[in-house]
Image (tube, rainbow, N blue to C red):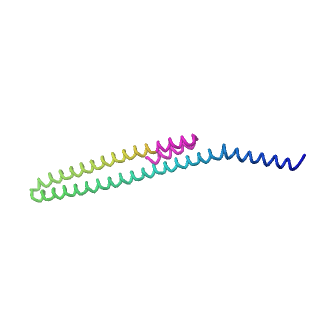
Amino acid sequence: MNVTATLLGQMITFVIFVWFIKAYLWEPLINAMDERTNKISEGLASAELGQKKIESAKNEYIRIVQEAKVKAADVINLAQQQSNAMIDDAKAISKKEAEKIIAASNHQVKQDLNQAKEKLRQDVSRIAIQCAEKIIDAEIDESKHKKIFSDGMKELK
């Protein structure tokens, strides 16, 4: 056997092998990696948007609570001014009325807060489902997905 012919054959085989890898494996692999990178960045953008919505809801909650406190303080001051002008019986009635208004305001604030939280949960759930769909499209692994989904549900609670 001729060593030169063997080396030449091996070089030709190696060149064909490298060409085959580049043509049929390398570019699809790079494309798949680029797609995965894009999906991950979209998921991160969605998560960031969710965080912004959470912050917005939190700020709205703080604003509503502050307005309710101001309104409640105004109601209390008005009730106290009226109660000072009335007899002792009228004082008790006006205080009870002020407490009812405060309780109603607090109840309304709690309802608004619960509605905002529920809306936020729905938005986060929708985003989580979209992320899960993207993950499933990219890679199907049942055990990983169950863990990701359960972690997401724990965060929502």
| Front residue (pair 83, 122) | 122
The residue at 44%/45% (across/down) is 127
The residue at 57%/40% (across/down) is 140
| Front residue (pair 127, 89) | 127
| Front residue (pair 147, 82) | 147
Residue 104 screen position, x and y as percent: 24, 48
* Main secondary structure of the magenta stretch: helix
Is residue 126 positioned above or below 67 on the image?
above
Residue 156 screen position, x and y as percent: 44, 47
Picture quarter containing residue 91? bottom left
The residue at 70%/44% (across/down) is 20
101 with respect to 2 (left or right): left
Residue 44 screen position, x and y as percent: 48, 51
16 with respect to 122 (left or right): right
Residue occupying the far right of the picture: 1
Q: Which residues are magenta?
A: 128-157
The residue at 74%/45% (across/down) is 16
